[in-house]
């Protein structure tokens, strides 16, 4: 982690009619930092992520991701981030290497770059020998690791992971976190949501959203001390219930 | 009579084996958990029990009724909440509930006491279309609809998946209160911490049962020494612990690493080993395993076979 901010959010507000989904959010995320973006269902996490990814415009406030302004240059943001979610990741009826070729093409990589990155990333997962297998036949844990690799294929500065480990077995879930750590050590900033509260503890920083606002933001250990709770799970329950 | 009896059930979808020889019994009045990740076979098993799917082989019965030959009897006494929201999105909250009540020949009024605690939370929105409810409210409506005919047994397929920690806690409080009324409950979940809220659980992985027992007994069977190890840098700690010669496994659990060992060792020995690798603020504490430690241990053993 360095001191350079990769995500800067200042007074971000997003309204849908009279409803305020994001209410004056302000926070920074540094290069290589792993941020756990937590909150109850309906707290406004998805709205904020869409704005940070350049998919939705804020009502007011300043948002910059990877050096680009979310209002003026949302397209530049999209080129510099990776995104993976539990709901949509890869195409089930393509092979592993076809998925890499497809997404590499979308991100504008050359054929040579695609070949090289596919090889590198699959070797790292120890799945190179399976590259011609159709995705549908693979275990969920493999698919999630592959989806992560595809999301970092174009070497983005920031990776958004929306519940990447949902439904994954406990061993694979932890292997997935090792991939996250590796990416962070390479200098990629990780923005991750999860309902597994133990995973919140693996993050450098956690943000806790309640009813459109960020109620707590800091290192897991410091937050636990400040609120006098044994775990982030208890912090979550404490903040979201009051 | 057992609430549920399952004999040697197999189910495949083309080349994918969903269930491979499941044998299981659930007692009347039990809160029974099917615990496992996606692909474990939880949904297939629940759908077979709810008479919505035929097994390829084997047989199952609910309160003595066969799930194939006597499915009509079972449907009268069973409530089912599928994993995906499947109520009528273009009917209102109240219309959905009325519809389910009338199908089963009852009324909301007759069994209101049973759903009161849950339904009251969504009653202010009873004129709202079901499709326009939030996730948490949909879940409460689905449970109300599954309960409105006062079932003897309730099948809940991953009711808390994707639900935040607070709503999950509330949902389990509701399940506990339903258990008090005497309803047998079979609930599936990928969250290992929820296992400890069940009377008994089946730990499932890739279509097989890793173990079936009370949470306390499963924990009692854990056969390694387990330690919670901490230092300033979690990621490096995991890697370094794996190179320690007494280590069976090392996995992160929250802000510590759970180290399982087969051989006993002196704690100073590990402390010295980690200090030598440059770790600071090291703590090493012996701990009791949780269900997740047990699940991972059983998984590794199955993979080794």
Image (cartoon, rainbow, N blue to C red):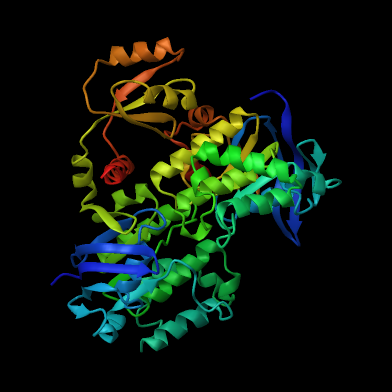
Task: Please state if B10 lies on the left or on the right of A202 as rendered.
Answer: left
At x 35%, y 63%, the residue is B17
Quadrant of the rendered structure where residue B223 is?
Answer: top left
- Closest to the observer: A20 or A198? A198
Q: Quadrant of the C terminus of chain B?
A: top left
x, y (%) of residue A63? 78, 41
Task: Report the number of discs.
Answer: 0
Q: Quadrant of the N terminus of chain B?
A: bottom left
At x 45%, y 71%, the residue is B142
At x 62%, y 53%, the residue is A99
Residue A207 appears in the rendering: no
At x 28%, y 79%, the residue is B77
Looking at this view, name the residue that lies furthest to the right. A72
x, y (%) of residue A165? 49, 48
- Closest to the observer: B77 or A20? B77
Vertical relation: B305 (above or below) B19: above
Task: Please state if A205 lies on the left or on the right of A69 as rendered.
Answer: left
């Amino acid at each position: 982690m360095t001191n350079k901010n990769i995500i800067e959010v200042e007074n971000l507000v997003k309204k849908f009619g009279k409803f305020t989904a994001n209410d004056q959010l302000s926070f920074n995320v540094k290069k290589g930092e792993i941020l756990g973006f937590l909150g109850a269902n309906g707290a406004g996490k998805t709205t904020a992520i869409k704005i940070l990814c350049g998919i939705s415009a804020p009502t007011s406030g300043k948002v910059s991701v990877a050096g680009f302004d979310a209002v003026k240059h949302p397209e530049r943001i999209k080129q510099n981030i990776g995104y993976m979610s539990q709901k949509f990741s890869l195409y089930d009826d393509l092979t592993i290497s076809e998925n890499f070729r497809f997404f590499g093409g979308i991100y504008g990589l050359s054929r040579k770059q695609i070949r090289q990155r596919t090889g590198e990333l699959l070797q790292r997962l120890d799945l190179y020998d399976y590259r011609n297998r159709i995705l549908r036949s693979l275990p969920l844990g493999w698919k999630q690791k592959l989806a992560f690799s595809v999301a970092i294929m174009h070497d983005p500065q920031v990776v958004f992971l929306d519940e990447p480990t949902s439904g994954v077995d406990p061993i694979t879930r932890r292997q997935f976190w090792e991939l996250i750590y590796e990416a962070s050590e390479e200098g990629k900033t990780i923005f991750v949501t999860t309902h597994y509260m133990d995973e919140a503890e693996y993050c450098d920083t956690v943000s806790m959203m309640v009813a459109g606002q960020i109620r707590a933001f800091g290192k897991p250990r410091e937050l636990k001390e400040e609120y006098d709770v044994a775990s982030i799970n208890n912090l979550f329950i404490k903040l979201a219930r009051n | 009579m057992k609430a549920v009896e399952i004999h040697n059930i197999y189910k495949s979808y083309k080349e994918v084996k969903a269930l491979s020889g499941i044998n299981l019994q659930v007692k009347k009045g039990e809160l029974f958990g099917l615990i496992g990740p996606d692909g474990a076979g939880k949904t297939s098993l629940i759908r077979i029990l709810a008479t919505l799917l035929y097994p390829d082989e084997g047989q199952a019965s609910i309160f003595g009724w066969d799930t194939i030959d006597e499915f009509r009897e079972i449907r009268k006494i069973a409530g089912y909440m599928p994993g995906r929201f499947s109520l009528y999105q273009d009917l209102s909250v109240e219309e959905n509930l009325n519809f389910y009540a009338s199908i089963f020949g009852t009324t909301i009024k007759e069994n209101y006491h049973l759903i009161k605690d849950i339904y009251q939370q969504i009653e202010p929105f009873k004129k709202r279309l079901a499709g326009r409810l939030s996730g948490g409210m949909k879940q409460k409506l689905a449970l109300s609809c599954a309960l409105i005919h006062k079932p003897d047994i309730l099948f809940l397929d991953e009711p808390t998946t994707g639900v935040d920690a607070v709503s999950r806690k509330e949902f389990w409080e509701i399940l506990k209160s339903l258990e008090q009324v005497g309803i047998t409950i079979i609930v599936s979940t990928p969250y290992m911490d929820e296992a400890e809220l069940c009377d008994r659980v089946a730990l499932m992985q890739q279509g097989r049962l890793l173990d079936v027992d009370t949470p306390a007994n499963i924990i009692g069977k854990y056969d390694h020494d387990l330690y919670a190890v901490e230092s300033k840098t979690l990621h490096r700690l995991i890697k370094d612990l794996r190179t320690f010669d007494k280590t069976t496994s090392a996995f992160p659990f929250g802000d510590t690493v759970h180290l399982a060992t087969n051989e006993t060792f002196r704690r100073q020995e590990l402390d010295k080993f980690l200090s030598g690798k440059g770790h600071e603020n090291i703590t090493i504490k012996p701990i009791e395993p949780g269900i997740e430690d047990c699940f991972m241990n059983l998984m590794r053993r199955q993979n080794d076979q």
